[in-house]
Amino acid sequence: MPVITFQGAQYTCHGNETVTDCLERHGVSVATSCRSGICQTCLMRAVSGQPPYVAQKGLKPSLQDNNYFLPCVCTPTGDLTVALPGDKVLQRIPATVILKDHLNTGIIRLRLRPEQPFEFRAGQFINVCRETDGEVRSYSIASLPQYHEAIEIHVRRVSNGRVSTWLHDHVLPGERLLIEGPHGECCYMPDNRQQGLLLIGTGCGLSPLYGVLRDALDHGHAGPILLFHGSSSHDGLYLVDELRHLAEAHANFRYIPCVSAEPARTGYAGGRAEQVALQSVKSLAGMRVYLCGHPDMVKDTKRKAFLAGASLQEIHADPFITTHKTPLIDKQATAG
Amino acid sequence: MSKTLFDKLGGEKAVDAAVDIFYRKVLSDDRINKFFADVDMDKQAAKQKAFLTLAFGGPSNYSGKDMRVGHAQLVKIGLNDTHFDAVVENLGATLKELHVPDELIAEAAQLAESTRNDVLGR
Ligand code: HEM
């Protein structure tokens, strides 16, 4: 009979029991709602073992690829080790800081070299842990595993943000941090190379989008790719030259930097990134949309993008903003 | 056993096709969209799917009691018959857009109707 490993303990499934039933029979309480594989309240991830297809049906392809499944309709056919999406069951591993530089006055770039094998995809996120007090924050990955051994993250200084100020002021190249992950599914999916991609980000929400963009270009994505990056001021934008170069080199890629609180200079659009984007792209029908940045912007733009024609299955957002609430993030992606 | 409306409409595929259309209508409908203002889009989409599966008489573990509990908060803030009618109207318009025959649309409306008292907490 299949054995479920969850949070370090093992539970044996009886008969046709689902993962949810099995855990509950053993007195483990897990969040559920519809119990019929629809509402996704109970979403889990198989860390090892393969959940049956029915338990993944209806999930976004990127979630399926990352072994997410719905335990309420999962009758396992073999042993499974399962974790909640925000769980810390995955091992923390050491990673060495091999580069630290400023992207602008408020945002630094860190490149981290994992000291153990670490598979990831651009656009996913890792949790960075400060060993002395166990504080954890999530940061999205801007780099491509196929070219960089290192994991690149962009860290905005948050006033009174314990982890971000520590990373900004104290952590030096050569030092080791503990990381955990990767998580999330805000990734490029090479399943439809003709599809239009709309990328909208504010502040260091550019980090995962930069990863998704380069991954798409690397896969030879043929459809149009539009990136709207916004900040209140010109100084709040970053990687502007790199992105302009990419746009020159790829006819199907357009980069539109947006500033909302200053008169826009030549080559920049005036207004908030999401507004400029939704004004210039009239119908989003058939497009895949990525939204990263300030949580309010993401929430609001999800709705607007949907109403402008994007299918719900095609709207991807920086996941850690909504999954684990305040303690895990330094409001990391807040505009600026 | 006779075929359910859910099967006649084309099963899960039909529901998937209807979710985006239906939810877009609901969010654009000023008579009822305030009830959906604060819900998370992704979770809500999953719930819309549950709603449509139920409305089509498909496999569902929801009971009348669940419908009461699920909408009790909304009843407190004023959910009433006119809102219910608006939802049924959007459901009909969605099915029409998907070229579902009129007699099946009527069947779906009737099924939705059967939940009215539970949804409105009466
Ligand atoms: C036509 C009959 C209706 C049916 C069969 C129905 C069915 C459902 C179902 C299955 C859920 C998911 C419950 C859950 O898993 O938590 C739900 C949630 C919801 N329904 Fe309905 N519903 C009906 C009418 C309405 C009406 C008239 C409104 C308001 C105009 C409404 C607004 C909502 C909202 C806002 C939620 C989400 C509540 C939350 O997430 O907290 N429903 N409904």
Image: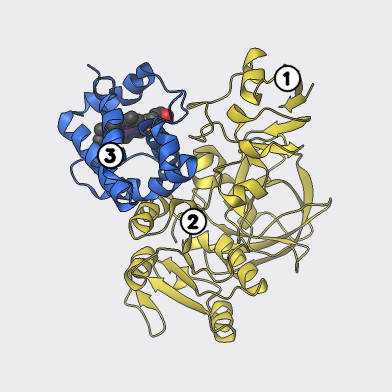
Please identify, in this view, whether the residue under mark 3 or under mark 1 is nearer the observer: 3
Amino acid on which the number 2 mark rests in the picture: Glu
Query: Which residue is at the far left?
Result: B82
Asked which quadrant contains residue A101, the reply is bottom right
Split into quadrants, the picture shows ligand 1 in the one at top left
Query: Which residue is at the far front?
Result: B2
Assign the N terminus of chain A to one quadrant of the image: top right
| Chain of the residue displaying label 3 | B
Amino acid on which the number 1 mark rests in the picture: Cys
Q: Is the residue marked by circle 1 packed among few (<14), some (14-19), or many (20+) residues within 10 Å?
A: many
Residue A100 location (% of width, % of height): 68, 64
What colour-coding does the image apply?
Answer: by chain
Residue A108 location (% of width, % of height): 60, 63
- The mark found on residue A314 in the picture is 2
Residue at screen point 64% across, 30% down:
A74
Task: Please say if A83 is above or below A313.
Answer: above
| Chain identifier of the blue chain | B
Residue at screen point 21% across, 29% down:
B79
- The mark found on residue B103 in the picture is 3
Task: Please say if A218 is above or below A336.
Answer: below
Element type at mark 3? helix
Task: Please say if A334 is above or below A48.
Answer: below
Residue at screen point 38% across, 63% down:
A274
Residue A179 location (% of width, % of height): 72, 47
Element type at mark 2? helix
- The mark found on residue A13 in the picture is 1
